[in-house]
Every structure is written in C-alpha cells, then in structure tokens.
Image (cartoon, grey):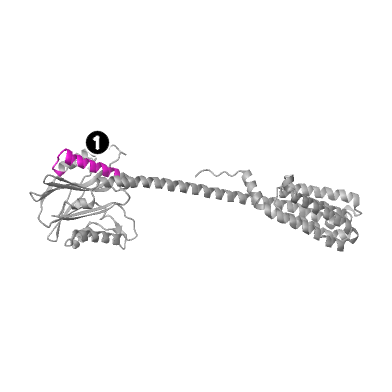
Amino acid sequence: MAEINITDIEVKDAFYKSTERFHVITCWVGIILNILWFASDYFIVPGYMIPFLLFRITVSAVTVLALVLKQTLNISIYSCLFILVLGISLQNAYMWSVMDLAHLQKHTFAYIALFIGVGMLVLWDTKLSIIILFATILSNIAFYEINSSLTVEEFLISGGLLTLSVAVFSVFLIRTRYRLTLNEIRIRLELEKSKQIIEEKHKEVLHQKKEITDSINYAKSIQSAFIPTEEQFNSNFKDSFVLFKPKDIVSGDFYWVRQKDNLLFYATADCTGHGVPGGFMTMLGLSFLDEIIEGKSTKNPAEALNLLRDKIVHTLKQTGNIGENKDGMDITLCCIDKTKNELTYSSANNSVYLIRNNELTIYKGDRQPCGFHHENEPFSAHTITINPNDCIYTFTDGYADQFGGPKGKKFRYKQFEDTLLSNVNDSFSIQKMKLSSTLETWKGDLEQVDDLLVIGIKI
C-alpha cells in the first residue's frame, strides 16, 4: 500500500473546519456572559458598577465587531476569541485594582472562572494562551501601581497567586487538549486516506479481475471450439455420456474423438495443473492429437502417445534439468476397430474399466506421464476383444480424488468402481446424472479440488 503522508497544513485545515462552529458559539456565549456578570458587580462593588459596565460593554462590543467583520478583516474565529479573552482579562485586572480587600476576594472567582472556562472550552495555539498569560500579569501590575491601595502581600494572598496558578494550569490544559485534538484529526485523516487508498486499490483489483476473467472466458470459448460438444462425442457411439466438470473457467482435462476410416479414436486426458496453465496444455494436446492421427495417419494408440510425448517435450523444451517444468499429461487413448470388434488402448498413468455382465475388469496403463520422464520407456498398446453391450469407462483422477463425506476424505477409486457397477444397467444419461449427484452429495460444501472427467461408452 502507498505511504500515507498527512501534512501539518492538512491537519490544521481540518482542525479549523471541525472546530470553527464550536468556537463561534463559545465566543457568543462569552460575550453574553461577560455582560451578565455585571449583576455580580452590582452586589460586590456597587460604587464602580457604571465604569465596570462600560468596560464590559466595550470588551463585548469590540468582540462583536470583530465577529461581524472577521471576513472583511480576514481574521479567524480564534482571533475573535483571543480579543474577547484578552479584553476580559484586562477588564478583570482593572476591576481588581480599584477594589478593597474584601471585594477583591469575592471577585477572584470571576477571574478564576475566566481561565477555567478558557482552558475547558477553547482550542487554540499555545502561543495565544502565553500572550494572554503575560498580558494578564503585566496588566495587573500596571493597574495595581496606578489604582490599588492594597499591599503586594494582600493582593497576592487574596487572589493573585491563586488566579495566576489557575491561568498557568489553563495554558497547559489548552496545550494538551490542542495537541490531542490535532493528533486525533491526523489519525482520522490517515484512516480516511487509508480507506480511500483501499477503495481505489479495490476498484483497481476488481477492474483487473474483470479483465482477467473476460480474457479467461474468451480463452474458454476458444478451448470449447477445440473440444467436441457432448452431442458430437455421443454421436459416435451406441450409447455414451461425458461427465465434464472443470474446476475453473478453463479446464486442464479434455476429451477428444476422431473417426478415421473404420477406426474410432477417442481420448480422455488430464493435463498438468488446472485453470489457465492446464488450459494451455489442453490446447497443445488437442492440436497434437489432430496432427498425429489426421496428419501422420497413425493408427496405433501407443505410437500416437510416443509421438505426443515427443512433441510435448520438444515444444516445452524439457531436458530434465533441476527446477525445470515437468508439464505433461495423463492420458488414455482408445481405438475401436469396428470390423474386428477390438478396442486397443494405450494409457499414461490411467486405467480403462470394462464392465461385462455386471463384472468389472480393470486394464492398467503405463506408469509414466505423457511428457518428460527420467526413463522415457515407449508406451505399450493393449488390445481387448469387445462384445455388444460392453461398457467402457475412461476417466481422470478428479472424481476419485474429490474430498467430502462425513470425515472429509477422498472419494477413492473403490467407491468410484462400486458406483459404476451399481448404475451400469441404467441408460448412460441416467448413469451420468447419478455419477454427478453422488459426487455432489459427497462433496457437500467443500470446494471442487480438480478438473473432473468421466467418459462412458457402450459397444
């Protein structure tokens, strides 16, 4: 993910936007309360209530003027608040300077309330609080020298030191709350930016996924053009089915059929991998089979697999070096001679099942793939005499290797064989349906682990 960099300017802008309304309300409340505090002046120092009122009105009026003209004067709400707090602080310093000891002690609460209120309600840069603190100290000293009849000791003990302590505490309180607020805003902005980046990446991934999926779907249409439809396959046999379930959009399993004079060739193949890699191997296998059977007029399945292996090794430039790909396929290639009633097959790693009179016979294949192998033995051909109503089954390992059942184990070949035997007397369309439903029940909610291909034909 890209680095998230929130500048101080962005944080300050967000701070001003999020706190401006609150500070506007605080400023107006402070203006109103400053006037209302005149009631305390009447009871505490009635002899000075008129000059006190004029001072309060002046401070509030200047602040109102600043609020109304802040856009014209190009000043912020924090400057307006600063004017209000500074004015009230100077106002209170003047009030203190003309009071006797008893009235000073009573009015101390008003001064303390000012700084507590500022500390709790105002969020601004610490330097403004420091300016007000020093302005408060200097104005109290100046007004004290001009007006007060109290001693320094009386002035400090009766409220000066307490007010100064509260003022200093308020500075630290404002500073802490200001920094915490900025940190919170920075974190919020980082989260928002992270969310934005994640959403952009998500859209990018979705777009890429759509492009990839569209490409794979197009590849599927190309692959489907090479693989015969089930109807095309079935048209070559008395009765047959093709149970073909790719794990992904494109398949690493494929089937193929070709009529050559009185010979009928068909193949059941499982290429290395599934999905796109398996799909590429499928295209090679289909093309090579066409070339070998049609172009070279090869009639022996073993010879055809030998040629197919040579083409795969040559095309993929396989030499057997360490780390090199070992791509290839497990394949069963069958050839039915209709005049001799014989089925000749050659197989790489797969078996051929024949069910006759409800008895299953397993014909093994060569234990080597059709691809690079350290021994590279020639493939062997096996011929089976076939009778009417014999059922021949060829398949890949996807069916037997599917996980499922109550313990999540593989279906395995024994159970696959039992399933074929139990359904052999049904029509092949029913057999296909039962094979499919049996596996779906076994699989349950588990994912399909591999491409799946089972082909059944009746002689």
Along the line of sight, which residue is nearer the eye, 272 or 161? 272
Residue at (13, 43) in percent of width and height: 300
The x and y percentages for residue 393 are: 18, 54
Q: Is residue 297 magenta?
A: yes
Along the line of sight, which residue is nearer the eye, 399 or 424? 424
Along the line of sight, which residue is nearer the eye, 117 or 221? 221
The x and y percentages for residue 458 are: 15, 56
Residue at (27, 59) in percent of width and height: 439
Q: Is residue 290 left or right of residue 58?
A: left
The magenta segment is 279-301
Measured along the vertical axis of the image, is residue 5 above or below residue 54?
Answer: above
Q: Is residue 169 magenta?
A: no
Measured along the vertical axis of the image, is residue 81 above or below residue 375?
Answer: below
Q: Which residue is mark 1?
A: 314
Q: Which amino acid, mark 1?
A: His
The x and y percentages for residue 233 are: 20, 51
Label 1: element kind? helix
